[in-house]
Amino acid sequence: MLVLPVSYSVPRRHLRPTIRIAIRFDRAAGKTAARLVFTRSGHEYTADDVGGGVVDVAELCLRLAALLLMKPAPRRLLVADEPFST
């Protein structure tokens, strides 16, 4: 399971608990399926439980993480044309 912490750079009075993003891989009927799970303050939420904007940001973070972890390292160029449309 891959877990990526997400934090905010805002004044302390506006801080919320850290949200953790995890990818859960489930195997059923000979197929593997991946699903996003969000954890905050010990409570788990699925992609259906959170707003679409949260899922869009999580997907962008995961794409950036994959780009940064690629070996050998490619040119770090990200072209984003409507990055929050799937």
Image (cartoon, helix red, strand yellow):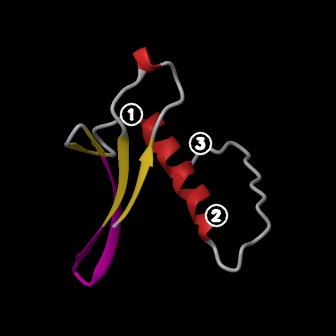
Q: Is residue 25 left or right of residue 83?
A: left
**Residue occupying the point 52% across, 23% down:** 10
Residues at marks 1 and 2 touching, judged by CB atoms closer than 8 Å: no
Residue span colored magenta: 25-38
- State which quarter of the image contains the N terminus: bottom left
Q: Which callout, 1 or 2, points to the residue nearer the camera?
A: 2
On the image, the x and y values in percent for residue 14 come to: 42, 17
* Disc marking residue 84: 3
Residue in the foreground of this view, choosing between 85 and 24: 24
Q: Is residue 55 covered in magenta? A: no
**Residue occupying the point 65% across, 45% down:** 83
Q: Residues within 10 Å of mark 2 (few under 14, many from 20)?
A: few
Location of residue 12 with respect to 49 vertically, above or below? above
Mark 3 vs mark 2: which is more N-terminal? 2
Residue in the foreground of this view, choosing between 41 and 32: 41
Q: Amino acid at mark 1?
A: Gly
On the image, the x and y values in percent for residue 28 come to: 22, 76
Residue in the foreground of this view, choosing between 24 and 49: 24
Prevailing SS of the magenta stretch: strand
Asked which secondary structure carries label 1, the reply is loop
Residue beneath label 2, please? 68
Q: Is residue 32 covered in magenta? A: yes
Asked which secondary structure carries label 2, the reply is helix
**Residue occupying the point 76% across, 61% down:** 76
Residue beneath label 1, please? 51
Q: Residues within 10 Å of mark 3 (few under 14, many from 20)?
A: few
Asked which secondary structure carries label 3, the reply is loop
